[in-house]
């Protein structure tokens, strides 16, 4: 999992970087909110963001809002990390789109526990997105099969949506997941194999 660290204080940024790397997380860092937003828009592999609230150029809450606008299909898990710990601050941070909120100075073990929770959420979201895409593909295949499908009156090949022709067995197997086997109906058996005892 890749974590974006957005923190204007160089020492805090380094501590966070070392904390996450020690746990085998990949990290990218930004010293202000503008750079953090650019990294999110350019790097689709970022799964989580740990944002300081008070940053120059763009603060953590606005970064959080921009992240939500940038990444709608594969959301990033966002943790706000700040010295602001009043109840109203927590509410404001969560309303801005943060998934979690932690006060500074942070406890390393607690932060890592919260990151692990985020990791599980990200994993579940990815799995859900994969399943949704799979269902959408299945729906599209069903829709194709429900439409009028042109086929050759002589060889019975089907014209696909790519304007190519393929055997009816191949077309059905590709678009429905059904595996076809060959057989003989009684009429064809009698017509083509009249001497058969079957």
Image (tube, rainbow, N blue to C red):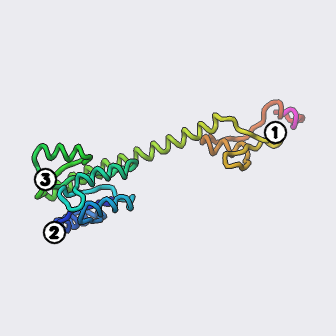
Q: Disc number at residue 103?
A: 3
**Mark 2: which secondary structure?**
helix
Q: Disc number at residue 11?
A: 2
The foreground one among 185 and 25 is 25
- Is the C-beta separation of discs 1 and 3 under 8 Å? no
Vertical placement of 40 versus 142: above or below?
Answer: below
Q: Is residue 158 visible?
A: yes
Which residue corresponds to the image point at 78% horizontal and 32% vertical from the top-left?
A: 185
Q: Disc number at residue 153?
A: 1
- Dot 3 crowding, Cα within 10 Å, few <14, some 14–19, many 20+: some
As measured in the structure, the alpha-carbon distance from the residue carrying label 1 to the one carrying label 2 is 75 Å
Image quadrant where residue 197 sits = top right
Report the side of 170 relative to 21 (left or right): right
Which residue corresponds to the image point at 19% horizontal and 55% vertical from the top-left?
A: 53
Image quadrant where residue 11 sits = bottom left
Give the x, y percent position of residue 87.
11, 43
Q: Disc number at residue 173?
A: none
Give the number of callouts.
Answer: 3
Q: Which residues are magenta?
A: 189-193
Instruction: Select label 1 or label 2 by which is in front.
Output: 2
């Amino acid at each position: 999992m890749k974590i974006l660290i957005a923190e204007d204080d160089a020492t805090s940024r380094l501590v966070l970087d070392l904390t996450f790397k020690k746990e085998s997380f990949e990290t990218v860092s930004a010293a202000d909110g503008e750079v953090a937003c650019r990294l999110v828009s350019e790097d689709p592999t970022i799964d989580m963001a740990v944002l300081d609230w008070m940053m120059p150029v763009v603060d953590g809450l606005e970064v959080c809002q921009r992240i939500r606008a940038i990444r709608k299909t594969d959301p990033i898990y966002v943790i706000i990390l700040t010295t602001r710990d009043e109840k109203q601050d927590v509410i404001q941070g969560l309303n801005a789109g943060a998934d979690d909120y932690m006060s500074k100075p942070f406890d390393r073990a607690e932060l890592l526990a919260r990151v692990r929770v985020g990791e599980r959420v990200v994993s579940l979201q990815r799995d859900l997105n994969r399943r949704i895409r799979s269902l959408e593909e299945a729906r599209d295949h069903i829709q194709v099969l429900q439409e009028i499908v042109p086929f050759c009156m002589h060889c019975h090949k089907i014209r696909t949506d790519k304007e190519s022709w393929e055997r009816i067995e191949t077309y059905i197997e590709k678009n429905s997941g059904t595996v076809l086997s060959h057989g003989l109906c009684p009429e064809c058996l009698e017509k083509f194999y009249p001497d058969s005892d079957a």
